[in-house]
Amino acid sequence: MITLTWLLLIALIGGILALVDGILRLRARGGSTVVGVIEVIVAALFLLAFFVPGIPWGAVVLGVATLIALVVALFLGGRTGRGITLAAVVVIAIWLVLVNQWIVVPGLN
């Protein structure tokens, strides 16, 4: 059974935003499809890491990989908007800071 916590909600929001951004990059004409494919795969594995115990890497490693893919997608640009990408970068970065306890917020971590 999965316990619903604030950290899980933050991670799910970031993963869903990254997945949606990757799908939008794949559907855009003239966009970089390689970055979109990598972003979709890494974001899907990041989301699955919370629910399936057989994912080879942990959620933190996949979170870092998703963050790197999002930053690369942000710098490469393309015809897609940058709003979803920026939102996903911010949410996943906040999740990484909180889950590693670099900043301790009582009630969150």
Image (cartoon, rainbow, N blue to C red):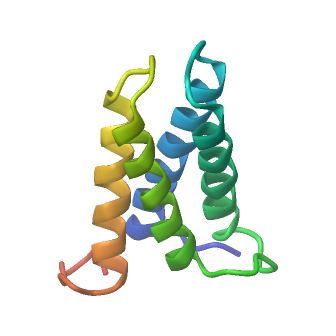
- Quick one: quadrant of the N terminus? bottom right
User: Relative to residue 12, is residue 3 depicted above or below?
Assistant: below
Rendered view: 66 above or below 71: below
Q: Is residue 10 left or right of residue 1?
A: left
Q: Position of residue 45 (x, y in %)?
A: 69, 61
Residue 8 appears in the figure: yes
Residue at image coords 60%, 12%: 29
* Residue 98, percent from left and from top: 29, 76
Q: Splitting the image into 4 quarters, where does residue 101 fall? A: bottom left
Q: Residue at x 70, y 52 (%)?
A: 41
10 horizontally vs 20: left or right: left
Q: Residue at x 39, y 30 (%)?
A: 77
Task: Pinpoint residue 26: horizontal percent, then vertical percent.
Answer: 65, 27
Residue located farthest toward the top when viewing the structure as drawn: 29
Q: Residue 26, relative to residue 86: is it above or below? A: above
Say which quadrant the C terminus sits in. bottom left
Query: Relative to residue 31, is residue 54 drawn left or right?
Result: right
In this view of the protein, can residue 4 be seen by the observer? Answer: no
| Quarter where residue 76 is shown | top left
Tell which of 9 and 55 is nearer to you.
55
Q: Residue furthest right?
A: 54
- Residue in the picture at 59% in, 47% down: 39
Residue 105: name its quadrant: bottom left
Q: What is the tally of numbered marks visible in this picture? A: 0
Q: Is residue 91 above or below residue 50?
A: above
Q: In x, y percent, where is residue 37?
A: 68, 42
Residue 92 vs residue 25, the one in the foreground? 25
